[in-house]
Image (spheres, helix red, strand yellow):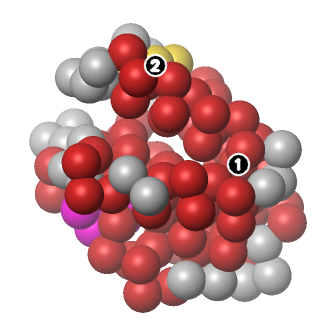
Amino acid sequence: MVCLGGISRIVANAASSCRYRATFIACACLCVSSLQAADTIEIATSAGSQQLLANAESLLASEQSRSAFDLLMSHESELAGNSLFDYLLGVAALDSGFYSEAVFSLRRAIATDNTIRL
């Protein structure tokens, strides 16, 4: 189980440093609005994948979006479809200036997690 409080912190940190705040906020709201109602989200991945996601969260929280993006992109083929992975990749991509990848990843997160509502 991964606490969504960490995701909310990432969103707040990324929004404060993002040059395109309006775009970021619009995309982030699509993913976060319904997730905030839940206390936790279950991640069906291996321990190694959970560690990778935790590392990416830490990088995003410390405003190292490009490093988080590079780390996550190197595992996209194996973790795409995991809603937390897709969300983190979308946030990292958006804050790093890869807008097309951000939209694609955030849409995938919404499509694979039935708790996210538009």
Q: Is residue 52 left or right of residue 55?
A: left
Whether residue 118 is visible here, answered yes or no, is: no
Q: Secondary structure at mark 1?
A: helix
**Nearest the camera: 23 or 104?**
104
Task: State the image coordinates of residue 16 (x, y, percent, origin top left).
Answer: 84, 61
Task: State the image coordinates of residue 115 (x, y, percent, origin top left).
Answer: 22, 38
Tag shown at residue 6? none
**Nearest the camera: 108 or 58?**
58
CA distance separating discs 2 and 1: 15 Å
Q: Is residue 50 magenta?
A: no
According to the picture, the residue beneath numbered tag 1 turns out to be: 60
Whether residue 21 is visible here, answered yes or no, is: yes
State how many labels appear: 2
Residue visible at 16% across and 57% down? 111
Task: State the image coordinates of residue 95 (x, y, percent, origin top left).
Answer: 67, 71
Of the two numbered discs 2 and 1 on the same chain, state the one appearing first in sequence: 2
The magenta region covers: 106-110
Residue visible at 80% across and 82% down? 19
Task: State the image coordinates of residue 23 (x, y, percent, origin top left).
Answer: 59, 81
Question: Splitting the image into 4 quarters, where does residue 69 fall?
Answer: bottom right
